[in-house]
C-alpha cells in the first residue's frame, strides 16, 4: 500500500462512470483517506492490514506518534478488539449502500444499471439484501454477467500460453470480483 492522490468522493454517484465496482473504488479512496488522516482521529486498535497501511501511507512523525500511543495501550487492549479503521469502513460502506438504494429512481443510476454496471460479488450481495425484489433480480443479472465475462477472459488467459505476468489487470479484476478491493473485507 502506498499513498495515492485522494479523490475525496462524497457520493457513490460520483464513481458510477469509473471502471470496476463503484463501491470498491469509493471505499478504497475512503480507506486511503482514513489512513492518511489518522492524526486527527483517536485510534485504539488496528488490524494487521491497517497497521501496515498506516506505516506505508502516513507521514512518519504522525505514524510514530500513533504507534507510540498504541504501544502504550497494546498491553491493555483485548486481542479481539475491532480495528478502528475497519469500523469506519463498515459504517461508510453501509451509508453508501443505503445512498445507492435511495437513488435507484435517478436517471444516472438507471442508465448505469442498464448499460455499464459492474459490481463485485460482495457489494452486489450487500445491495441485493437492501434492494426491492425487482432491483435485486437486476443486480443478480449484473453480477452473473460480469462473472461470466471474467470467466471467459480468464479461460482465454489460461489457455493462451502468454507470459506469466501478462494481463495483471484481468487478474486484479477477478480478485476484486471475488473479494472486493484489498483491505476492505477480511
Image (tube, rainbow, N blue to C red):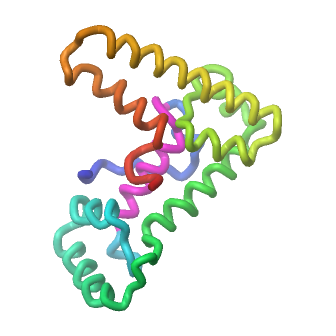
On the image, the x and y values in percent for residue 98 come to: 69, 52
Which residue sits at x=40%, y=48%?
7
Q: Which residues are magenta?
A: 18-37
Is 86 on the left or on the right of 119, as rendered?
Answer: left
> Does the magenta portion include 47?
no
Question: Residue 14 lies in what quarter of the image?
Answer: top right
On the image, the x and y values in percent for residue 86 come to: 46, 64
Q: Is residue 149 above or below residue 23?
A: above
Q: Is residue 160 above or below residue 14?
A: above
Which residue is nearer to you in this view: 43 or 167? 167
On the image, the x and y values in percent for residue 16 come to: 56, 35
Q: Is residue 34 above or below residue 179?
A: below
Which residue sits at x=45%, y=76%?
80
Which residue sits at x=71%, y=41%?
128
Which residue is nearer to you in this view: 87 or 31? 87
Which residue sits at x=33%, y=16%?
158
Question: Residue 166 lies in what quarter of the image?
Answer: top left
Q: How many marks?
A: 0
> Does the magenta portion include 32?
yes
Q: Is residue 20 above or below residue 69?
A: above
Amino acid at each position: 500500500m502506498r499513498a495515492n492522490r485522494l479523490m475525496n468522493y462524497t457520493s457513490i454517484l460520483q464513481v458510477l462512470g469509473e471502471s470496476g465496482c463503484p463501491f470498491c473504488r469509493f471505499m478504497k479512496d475512503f480507506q486511503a483517506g482514513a489512513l492518511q488522516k489518522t492524526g486527527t482521529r483517536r485510534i485504539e486498535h488496528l488490524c494487521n492490514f491497517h497497521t501496515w497501511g498506516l506505516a506505508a501511507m502516513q507521514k512518519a512523525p504522525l505514524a510514530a506518534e500513533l504507534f507510540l500511543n498504541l504501544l502504550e495501550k497494546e498491553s491493555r487492549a483485548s486481542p479481539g478488539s475491532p480495528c478502528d479503521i475497519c469500523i469506519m469502513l463498515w459504517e461508510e460502506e453501509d451509508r453508501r449502500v443505503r445512498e445507492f438504494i435511495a437513488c435507484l429512481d435517478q436517471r444516472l443510476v438507471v442508465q448505469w444499471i442498464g448499460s455499464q454496471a459492474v459490481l463485485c460479488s460482495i457489494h452486489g450481495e450487500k445491495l441485493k439484501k437492501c434492494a426491492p425484489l425487482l432491483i435485486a433480480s437486476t443486480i443478480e443479472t449484473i453480477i452473473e454477467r460480469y462473472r461470466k465475462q471474467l470467466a471467459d477472459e480468464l479461460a482465454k488467459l489460461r489457455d493462451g500460453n502468454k507470459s506469466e505476468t501478462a494481463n495483471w489487470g484481468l487478474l486484479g479484476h477477478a480478485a476484486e470480483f471475488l473479494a472486493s478491493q484489498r483491505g476492505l473485507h477480511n
